[in-house]
Image (cartoon, rainbow, N blue to C red):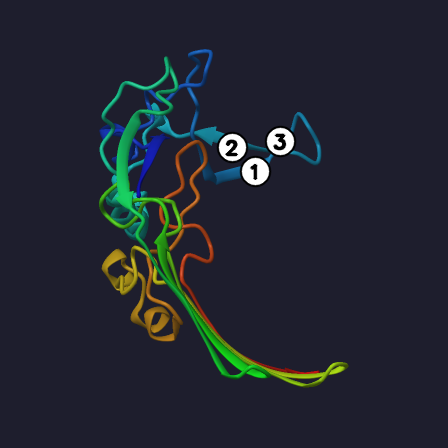
Amino acid sequence: INAGSFRQDTVPNAAERRGDFSDTRDAQGRLRVIYDPFTTRPNPAAPGRYMRDPIPGNAIPSARLDPIAVNAIKLYPEPNRPGLQFTRQFNLVTMQSRLNPTDRIEFKVDHNFTPSQRVFLRYNFLDTDSGPPDSWGNKATPVNSPMGNLAHNAVLDYTQTLGAATVINARYGISRLLVNRPGYSGGFDITSLGFPKAIADVAQVAVIPTFGIQDYTQLGPPGGDYYLSGNIAHTAQGT
């Protein structure tokens, strides 16, 4: 089955990627003023409150841009639509599909040793791989990657009739489940963004970090993108 995905995202334009917000506006067309946090000071007209100065020209000087942010912003695709009036929201539209395969095997074998003794064996196998596509095509799409489920289940059952009022039954079952979601960005080297090697060395999983940026689509996968779990269960019963 091919699963389709239609996305509308808000990504920074060329000027905003350079720190230039001189034409970044709200829904009413008003300029969204960028204030300089280093000018924070008490407001003499409002005791207990603070004030800041706007950044000249509403453009952050390149020397004040964080190197990690400069590298991370490159993971955003370029806009391919004008977006909404003034705000330019939803300026990236993508349509992708991804094959979600499913393999299933089921069988049961019955055997009668005698009219009063019988046994059956049942086995089930299921292998699925489903999830959304990498719509941005660069492993930074803000979605969880596909999850694979691999399941085996087997049951052996024995029944013997000893008399008109006596029947014994013994059953043994075993099941195994493996769930794996490696993440689209599995193996990503965070030092390529400028993070120190000391952080990369202690990271349990190497994936693109998640960046939440106000008024823009999240960059990178949601939390829990990498997932691995497995278990084996045995059951036995008799009556």
Secondary structure at numbered mark 2: strand
Q: Quadrant of the N terminus?
A: top left
Q: Is residue 17 above or below residue 191?
A: above
Q: Which residue is mark 3?
A: 43
In the rendered structure, find residue 52 and report the number of the disc placed on it. Answer: 2
Q: Give the mark, 3 or 2, whose residue is nearer the N terminus.
A: 3
Q: Quadrant of the C terminus?
A: bottom right
Q: Is residue 197 above or below residue 224?
A: below
Q: CA distance from mark 3 to mark 2?
A: 9 Å
Q: Position of residue 188 (x, y in %)?
A: 27, 61
The local crowd at label 2, few if under 14, some if 14 to 19, many if 20 or more residues have their Cα within 10 Å, is: some
Q: Residue at x 36, y 57 (%)?
A: 128
Asked if one can make out residue 59 in the rendered structure from this viewpoint, the answer is yes
Pointers 3 and 1 in contact (C-beta within 8 Å): yes
What's under tag 1, amino acid-wise?
Arg
Q: Is residue 215 above or below residue 37?
A: above
Secondary structure at numbered mark 1: strand
The local crowd at label 1, few if under 14, some if 14 to 19, many if 20 or more residues have their Cα within 10 Å, is: few
Residue in front for this viewpoint, 19 or 95: 95
Q: Which residue is mark 1?
A: 41
What's under tag 3, amino acid-wise?
Asn
Q: Position of residue 39 (x, y in %)?
A: 48, 38
In the rendered structure, find residue 138 and report the number of the disc placed on it. Answer: none
Pointers 1 and 2 in contact (C-beta within 8 Å): yes
The local crowd at label 3, few if under 14, some if 14 to 19, many if 20 or more residues have their Cα within 10 Å, is: few
Residue in front for this viewpoint, 159 or 1: 159
Q: Give the mark, 1 or 2, whose residue is nearer the N terminus.
A: 1
Secondary structure at numbered mark 3: loop
